[in-house]
Image (cartoon, rainbow, N blue to C red):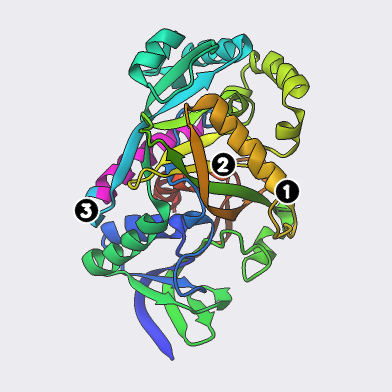
Amino acid sequence: MSERGFDLVVVGAGIVGLAHAYLAARRGLRVAVVERDHRCVGASIRNFGFVTVSGQRAGDTWRRALRSRDVWIEVAAAAGIRIEHRGLWLLARRPAARAVLEAFLRTPMGAQCTLHEPDEAAALAPALRTDGAAAAMHSPHELRVESRDAIALLAAWLAEALGVRFFFGEAVLDVAPPRVRTAQRTLHAARTVLCPGTELTGVAAPFLAPHRLRLTRLQMLRVRPEPPLRLPGAVMGDLSLVRYAGYAALPEAGALRVQLEAEAPHSLAHGIHLIAVQSADGTLVVGDSHHDDASPWPFASDAVDELILGHLRETVDVGRADVVERWTGLYPVGHEADCLVAAPDAALRVVVVASGTGASTAFGIAEDVLGRW
């Protein structure tokens, strides 16, 4: 079967592919999206739904995150996607962590963020466990959506409101613009954007081979706090300051890392840093860990989950935290930049977010790719 009449074919219906489809369709282009699965079940729904701005790597990543946040607000209103909460509280338990936050606030990326003493933070964000803390930073930039719902709602809205054609359940066998061949049909379009996500050994493999990407596996949990509590926004802790490049690149982060290597070596070894966000039903999505491999081991470790829950308890004033779901996620890593954009020829772009920042930066990336093309 042959399908014609498209200006752009997007391969991949994760957030990176959907962002390209949205921005192209908004410009009046006729867009088709091809996805191997029958619905999105990959990295784009196995995350926090957390659009993170503060802490992103200085330069393109931070700029794209700011822009993506604004586009998320527009798209969420149009597509019926609920914004669960806004903002970020980063609780510094160690004086060395406070020093990193103070340094961050002196950078341009710290604009509009505020540092609070523990008693101030306790009044503004009662769910935080501020006893013995050194300080807490509030960022107003972030927002959170329920990713497992938001991606499906976004795709449905793109089809209904903007006329994007979706071909789900079709594995792409060959990409050679102007043709994209699946097991069921051949689509024709002047240009193609290939967004393979975690499928590094499939049709994108020849284009990605020089970059030696690998995957990282995450462990994540959904917990029900008892008694119920309300988070004031997304929550992070000290370990995030040596994980997120916008903080970790600061000279002050070196002393914090040395202290964490002595006090939390197992968490660092498992790539753990705390993120906690809240869903409409009051449950918390909590994570995460990072284990890199070309083909990550599919079995999760209870010991790693317990480390993550331990960091939740030291940062958020939870009583019981009953685990109601556990899952693993994947995303690509290994590129020197947070996003890889390859241009094998004039009609093809290959876009891979190699840093776990897809939800935070995809719309900004798509604007750059389409704007420069």
- Provide the residue designation for mark 3: 78
Q: Residues within 10 Å of mark 3 (few under 14, many from 20)?
A: few
* Res 342 quadrant in image: bottom right
Q: Is residue 334 visible?
A: no
Q: Give the answer, above or below, for where 313 lies relative to 210.
A: above
Judged from the image, the secondary structure of the residue bearing numbered disc 2 is strand
Q: CA distance from mark 3 to mark 1?
A: 37 Å
Tell me residue 296's x, y (percent).
Answer: 72, 57
Mark 3 or mark 2, earlier in chain: 3
* Residue carrying label 2: 287
Amino acid on which disc 3 is placed: Ala
Q: Compared to 351, does 177 lie above or below?
A: below
Crowd tier of the residue under label 2, counting other residues whose Cα lies within 10 Å: few below 14, some 14–19, many 20 or above: many
Nearest to the observer: residue 242 or residue 325: 325
Q: Which mark is residue 292?
A: 1
The image position of residue 314, as x and y in percent, is 56, 25
x then y, percent, for residue 289 = 65, 42
Give left or right: position of 358 versus 232.
right
Front residue of 115 and 251: 115
**Does 242 appear above or below 203?**
above
Span colored in magenta? 59-76
